[in-house]
Amino acid sequence: MEISRDIKYIGVNDHRGELFEGQYVVPNGMAYNSYVILDDKIAVMDTVDVNFTQEWLTKLELVLCGRKPDYLIVQHMEPDHSASVAVFMECYPEAVIVASAKAFAMMKNFFGKDYAERRIVVADGSIFTLGKHELTFFTAMMVHWPEVIVTYDAADKVLFSADAFGKFGALDREDDWVSEARRYYIGIVGRYGQQVQSLLHKLAGCDIQRICPLHGPVLSDNLGYYIGLYQTWAAYEPEKSGVVIAYATIYGNTRKAAELLADKLRERGCEVVVHDLARCDMHQAVADAFCYDRLVLASSTYNADVFPFMKAFIQHLTERQFQNRRIGLMENGSWAPLSSRVMRKMLENSKNLTFADTVVKIFSAVKEENVAEIEALAAELV
Ligand code: FEO
């Protein structure tokens, strides 16, 4: 794949079906992107996952047409991009690694060596010339590890954005970019919104015509749309108007309450997304909670606490700095329902949450008085 006359794509598609980063389901696989800039000097941008080293090296050979790479630019040391660094350096003994100081410290940890004789350390604003292509590096701390740099090529107006602007899904599958990019962003980078905002601010002065991320497709049209989404996500602002109902049920009674609330909200013209936390993709539920402006949590009481799936869900939210939303609570219990108190306590340090006054309190099964409470909660939320 040709990105420009001088920039070639040499990434790979992973369909082995394992969880990405040990927790994210990837039904459409995953792409590990890598690029080559061919100039007076040749730079390879990042490597690939350990299971694809040989495929990647073969693609690299084809692009090189007999030349040798001068530099390996390591933007990010997470193993989905760095696992083939050591093999590359053995294959090309003249090549030099260009990376941040923190990345070289990580190489020592991962590979037992930090390439002290074969390295160039770059920092925020460092400029590096390959010939026609002048590269500027920007540090991108915690987007999504501390050593990350992104690279702007002024000649072709290309931003090599590391994990930023990436998504789940291999490049040989069709899916909805925004849905899988949101699930990826919220899951992986969501905690670091301030750092993402800082990176976007640094890049504001660059004339970017293409974004080449380490996952997902190269973006070349309507870049303002993608950058706008990142600004919304990084600021923890809701993207859509609507209510997410996330429930954790043991015998189905809490589910009945959640579904009744969904009906009442839809009758009022509200967009509603419902997740059964024991059965859905938990990270899709988390992404939806960040996407919409209202969230209802409905949980059975369990061991004087919330049901475990709800506990995990709220932890996923709070560790990603969930904020700026309106919240409704529904609890169930057969002798001492207290899950609403626990859920509220778990959210007490989250910024700018407003709670509906109505709390639906169910003893075992939904009854007439609960229907009235659910009506009242629906009215409050719309
Ligand atoms: Fe795609 Fe943070 O690695």
Image: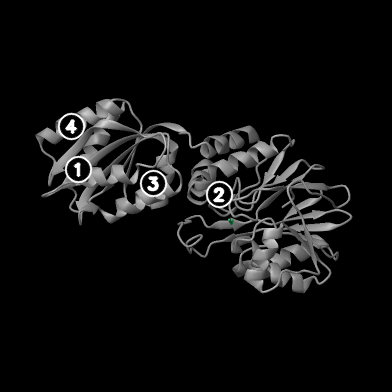
Question: Label 2, label 3: how many angstroms apart (C-alpha)?
Answer: 17 Å
Residue 150 x/y as whole percent:
69, 49
Question: Label 2, label 1: how many angstroms apart (C-alpha)?
Answer: 34 Å
Q: Earlier in the sequence, mark 2 or mark 3?
A: 2
- Residue 116 vertical position relative to residue 281 in the rendered view, above or below: below
Q: How crowded is mark 3: few (under 14 residues within 10 Å), some or many (20 or more)?
A: many
Q: Which mark is residue 285?
A: 3
Q: How crowded is mark 1: few (under 14 residues within 10 Å), some or many (20 or more)?
A: some
- What's under tag 2, amino acid-wise? Lys
Question: Label 3, label 4: how many angstroms apart (C-alpha)?
Answer: 25 Å
Residue to which mark 2 is pinned: 167
Residue drawn at (61%, 51%) of the image: 163
Q: Which of marks 4 and 2 is nearer the N terminus?
A: 2
- What's under tag 4, amino acid-wise? Glu
Which numbered disc, 4 or 2, marks the residue closer to the eye? 4
Question: Label 4, label 1: how many angstroms apart (C-alpha)?
Answer: 14 Å
Residue drawn at (24%, 43%) of the image: 341
- What's under tag 1, amino acid-wise? Lys
Q: Are marks 3 and 1 in contact (CB under 8 Å)?
A: no
Question: Label 3, label 1: how many angstroms apart (C-alpha)?
Answer: 19 Å
Q: Quadrant of residue 107?
A: bottom right
Residue to which mark 4 is pinned: 373
Q: Which of marks 2 and 1 is nearer the N terminus?
A: 2
Q: How crowded is mark 4: few (under 14 residues within 10 Å), some or many (20 or more)?
A: some
Is residue 284 visible to the viewer in this orientation of the structure?
A: no
Q: Is mark 2 on a helix, strand or loop?
A: loop
Q: Residues within 10 Å of mark 2 (few under 14, many from 20)?
A: many
Residue drawn at (77%, 69%) of the image: 116
Q: Residue 256 carries which label?
A: 1
Among all residues in the image, which is located at the extreme front? Answer: 349
